[in-house]
Structure formats: structure tokens, C-alpha cells
Amino acid sequence: MSRVHDALRRAEGTVPPEEEPQVPVSIPPLSPEVRFRDSQAFSTGPGAANGVPLRLNIHPAMLSEVVMVPFSPAPESHLLDLNNSHETPAEEFRTLRTRLNHLQTLQPLHTVIVTSPSPAEGKTFTAVNLALAHAHLAESSVLLGDFDLRRPIIHNLFQIDRAPGLSDFLTGQCTFPQALRRLEGMNLYVLPAGTPVKNPLELLNMRQAKLLFEDLPRSFNWAIFDTPPLLFSADANLLSTAADGTILVVKIGSTTFDNVTRAMQSLCENNVLGIVANGARASELYSKYTYYYSKAE
């Protein structure tokens, strides 16, 4: 990832003073014993202890119950036309998809969170278009989840209802299929954020959230989640301990090298797949959106 670091160092010197990001709160890595707490579950099953189930019993048959909605992205959504092979950004997401599919043959890799050091660096853009790229293959089901319960936006991009969604499922207000929407004409399922909650971190820290990550690979080949920025809340840091991998999105000319370093240090580095450099000039990173993964380095 040295090219990314070199480009960030060069780009850092071009950021006008008034555009410097707000100094974020330092989020230390989470120790294994405090990553998730056991809390009361909504259903029990064989082998369950103290009311906490061993799994949520999410299975592929449930997907037949999901409501189908039209694929009608909002004009400002910036979703890519993956049928147009001449669009450079679309080709970059196909390349990213190919590399992740290759990594999946080498290690268990089904659940991936997409985050960034600070806001407005392109994490949602990356998560949504990566999910679309995977779903475009139409070989297996793909889940796109909005785990940014603080400032959710995915439901607006697809012009669907925010609720019921993730928060409603975790609090027992709906079943998992009721929280999902399937986009018409593709194998992409969207899990919106759901009803607003006052305590997003506490909700994501529930045992049910961890069980959700464990059960999703039974129904989805890929589950991709948009999460809050790393340096402004502990949500993404917590979720990274449950996911199979983490992708960090940075914006050339905006993200400071110091913020990238602090974000990487806050993560459990053993599951960081790499960095998506958003907005890079071709002279620096060869294309507008370039993916660097560290597992092969």
C-alpha cells in the first residue's frame, strides 16, 4: 500500500485550511473480551443458554418471503451503470469484485464492512456500487446493509422505506425477511437502517448483531455493510470484529495521512482487506477508484 501512502502525503499538502476535517475522537481498538456482550434474545432453541440462542435460524428459504421493490435509484445516487463497459468507475468496481472473489477462494470471506476515517469520503458510494457489482453476476444472493444508524442514507438512494429495517429486527419488532427489500430484476437484497434509535452503539453491541453476522453466509454469498466513519464513533470498530473483512475508503485530496494511520490503528488489522482510494488522479493511482488489498502483499 506504499503508493496509497505516497499519494496521500502529496495530496495532504493540497488541502485548503478551511477544508481540514474536524479533529475526531480517538477510538482505540476493542479488546476481544469487550467486543460483544451477551444480551437477551428474542427466541430460544436447542442448546440455548440463559435465553441466548446459538443462532438466529436465518436460512435461504426465508428469502422467498421478502417484498420485491422496483429498482428506481434517486437521481443523486450516483449508482454506476455496470452494463456500460466503457465507464472507468464501473470497470474499477468489477475489478474490485474480481479480487474479492479471488480472496474468497483463499479464506472464509462473506461479510464485509465498508468504512472511512471521516465523513464524506465515499464509503456509501463504494458499498452500494460494490454490492451492485456482485449482484450483477446473478450467480448468488447479495445483501447490502445500512449499519450506519447515525446517518443512514441507503434507503434514500434506492427510494425505499427506511423501516422496517435493521434496528427493527434487532429489537424484535419484525422478522428478518420483513426487514429486507429485494430489488426487482436482480439478486440484490437491501437491509435499510430501520426506525431511528437513540443508542446505535448499544444496539449493535447486542448478541443478536453478532449472531446475524454468523448466520448471513448461509443465505448470501456476499453481505456488504455501510458503517459510520471510524474516527467519529466506535460503531465500525465494533462491527469490524464480527465481519470477515474490512475495506477502508479514503478520498485523495481530503483524507489526511494522519487520519488514515489512526483509522488503521483503530481496526483489528488482521481482517483489513485494503483501501479504496476515491477521487485519485490517474497520474497518482492509475485510475479514479483503485483498490489495494494487503493480503497478497
Image (cartoon, grey):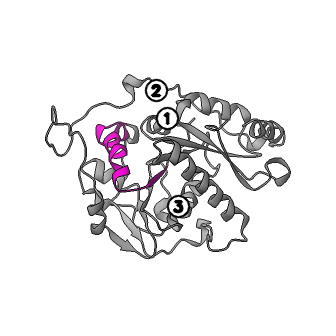
Quadrant into which the N terminus falls: top right
Instruction: Locate residue 192: give its quadrant.
Output: bottom left
Real-space Cα separation, disc 1 to disc 2, in angstroms: 7 Å
Q: Position of residue 265 (x, y in %)?
A: 60, 27
> Callout 1, which amino acid?
Asn
From the image, give the main secondary structure of the stretch colored magenta: helix
Question: 248 left or right of 167?
Answer: right
Q: Position of residue 38 (x, y in %)?
A: 27, 32
Residue 17 higher or lower than 131, as above or below: above
Question: Disc 2 residue type?
Answer: Leu
Q: Which residue is mark 3?
A: 134
Local SS, label 3: helix
The answer, for residue 183, to whether it is visible in the render is yes
Q: Nearer the viewer, mark 2 or mark 3?
A: 3
Q: Quadrant of the C terminus?
A: top right
Q: Position of residue 247 (x, y in %)?
A: 57, 44
Instruction: Check residue 198 in the rendering and tell me which mark sits there, or answer none.
Output: none
- Which tag, 2 or 3, sits closer to the chain's start? 2
From the image, tell me which residue sits under label 1: 237
Q: Amino acid at mark 3?
A: His
Position of residue 13 in the picture relative to residue 87 (left or right): right
- Disc number for residue 30: 2
Q: Quadrant of residue 96?
A: bottom right
Horizontal placement of 199 versus 87: left or right? left
